[in-house]
Image (cartoon, helix red, strand yellow):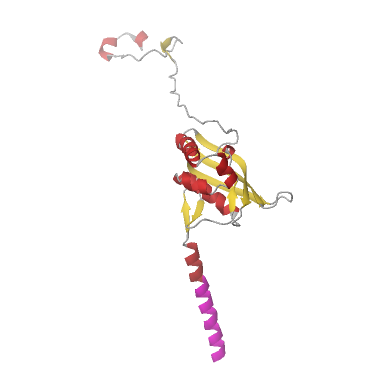
Amino acid sequence: MRKKKLNILCVLICIVSVTITGLILSSSFLFQPGGIATTSSTPSTPDDLLLQFFAYIENGQYEDMYELLDKRSQGAISREDFVERNRSIYEGIGVRNITLIISRMYEINDRPGRKFIDYNLRMDTIAGEITHNQQAVFEINENNEYRLLWTSRMIFPELGGDSRARVNILPAERGRILDRNGEMWRDQDPPQQLALYPAECAGKKSLL
């Protein structure tokens, strides 16, 4: 009987230890708006790197984004140009509430050392919600670390290397106002004041 109690006590101690360990590990994750989780240190797997990349966008950490690029991508664009390009576009359209949904991660036999990720990206902007499907490619480097093969199409699929994104806000036009006979009462002319005194309209139903 005593041996049975000791076994139960050992099991309870193991459960408590596992629970505490899980809480300690989970405390290293910071959840950002849009459902993107980031870690306190640089992630090592391609899917976590992709989540980190877009979390940096939402937080305006464009220089940290640049550190996740592979050497080939960094050789194609300088840090300064990368930061300016991403900042002008993302902040220009007022990006917020980024949601990233990874559908699959896979390898291709004739592309050793690379991981491919298909994902859906959604974000709110001052022009409304933008959503598109994309593919990210990560390549392992000499330090056995995965880094992102970045192109401008990760910003928008149709965006070329020298393209720019700009938002123009067009003021809404006022519609025409017609009277009961279908005659134009107000159009696009500058507004004017109109005063109506009920006492002066007594007996003049045609004015009403």
Q: Is residue 27 left or right of residue 158?
A: left
Query: In the picture shown, does residue 157 fall above or below 31?
Result: above
The image quadrant that residue 4 belongs to is: bottom right
| Whole-percent x, y for residue 81 in the image | 49, 37
| Residue 21 shows up from this direction | yes
**Main secondary structure along the magenta-highlighted residues:** helix
| Residue 54 shows up from this direction | no
The part of the chain drawn in magenta is 1-18
| 197, 163: nearer the viewer | 163
Picture quarter with the N terminus: bottom right
Q: Is residue 10 magenta?
A: yes
Which residue shows up at 54% across the image and 83% down it?
8
Which residue shows up at 56% across the image and 52% down it?
49
Q: Is residue 186 magenta?
A: no
How many numbered circles does the render carry?
0
Picture quarter with the C terminus: top left
Which residue shows up at 55% across the image and 43% down it?
74
| Whole-percent x, y for residue 141 in the image | 61, 53
Q: Is residue 196 left or right of residue 21?
A: left
| 170, 73: nearer the viewer | 73
| Whole-percent x, y for residue 152 in the image | 57, 37
| Whole-percent x, y for residue 204 in the image | 32, 8
Residue at the bottom extreme? 2
